[in-house]
Image (tube, grey):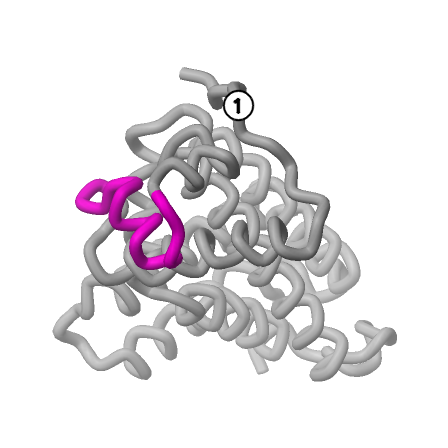
Amino acid sequence: MTISKNKARIPVQKRSIETKEKILNAAWELFAEKGYFKTNTNELAERAGIATGSFYGYFNNKKEVGIELMMRFYKEVSKKALSNFYIQIGDNVAENLDTGRKLVRFIIKSLKESHAINPLLHKETTALILLDEDVRNISSEEDKKIIAFLITLLQQHKQLIRVDDIEAAAVLLFRTSDEIIHRIMIHKDAIDEDRLLKELEDMICSYLFITVS
């Protein structure tokens, strides 16, 4: 399946840009309230305060809206994570992040904050990843960026790392943390959140590092 390319235009005038933003804001709300699959273009147009016909001047279909929202979501998550990293850690990683536990704690915290931006929309995105090839490809590319960032962090702390394959370790770190945090934020496991995150932190530290502080 490919993204359709038809009559929708790229807005350049202020009013058109504002209208497109209204559609995206409406989608952000409705997808979280009702779910992606239970929302139709008529509802998107109504929530945005425009005619249904006007909707198709900006997007060819609901899927295009979902994909643009997903791209914005990933961009916001990445920006927030990097911002938090430099606020908390600074440029001199080796000096300011002197233990493996601090590194793992930061990674888990960043992933948790990304899931908290819009948990219901995140849940809908997860469903779309399973059902739509275009969305799956976008998600895969964004995951690669996160993993590349983790590889860099681990390499900067290789004096602490006991595993030989840092690339594989970064993938395991991301996939394990992301899945546990997803379950905490979306599915609300019965075990207390702090207990789960503490055990996740201990598990990762024991796997990755020569000594655990």
Residue 122, image x, y percentages: 36, 56
Q: Is residue 55 left or right of residue 81?
A: left
Q: Position of residue 113 (x, y in %)?
A: 48, 72
**Is residue 122 found inside the magenta-colored segment of the image?**
no
Name the residue carrying label 1. Answer: 7
Magenta segment: does it hold 39? Answer: yes
Q: Nearer the viewer, residue 104 or 183?
A: 183
Q: Where, quadrant-wise, is the N terminus in this rendering?
A: top left
Residue at 29% in and 81% down: 195
Q: Quadrant of residue 80?
A: bottom right
Q: Which segment did they paint magenta?
A: 37-51
Q: Picture quarter containing residue 48?
A: bottom left
Query: Residue 183: x, y in percent?
Result: 26, 61
Q: Residue at x 34, y 49 (%)?
A: 45
Q: Amino acid at mark 1?
A: Lys
Badge 1 marks a residue whose secondary structure is loop
Mark 1 nearby-residue class (10 Å; few <14, some 14–19, many ≥20): few
* Residue under the image location 38 percent in, 36 percent down: 53
Q: Quadrant of residue 76?
A: bottom right
**Which image quarter is the C terminus in?**
bottom right
Can residue 164 be seen here? The reply is no
Q: Is residue 1 visible?
A: yes
Q: Please say if 65 is above or below 101.
A: above
Q: Which of 64 and 18 lies nearest the eye of the viewer?
A: 18
Q: How many numbered marks are there?
A: 1
Is 93 located above or below residue 11 in the figure? Answer: below
x and y, in percent, of residue 9 in the image: 60, 32
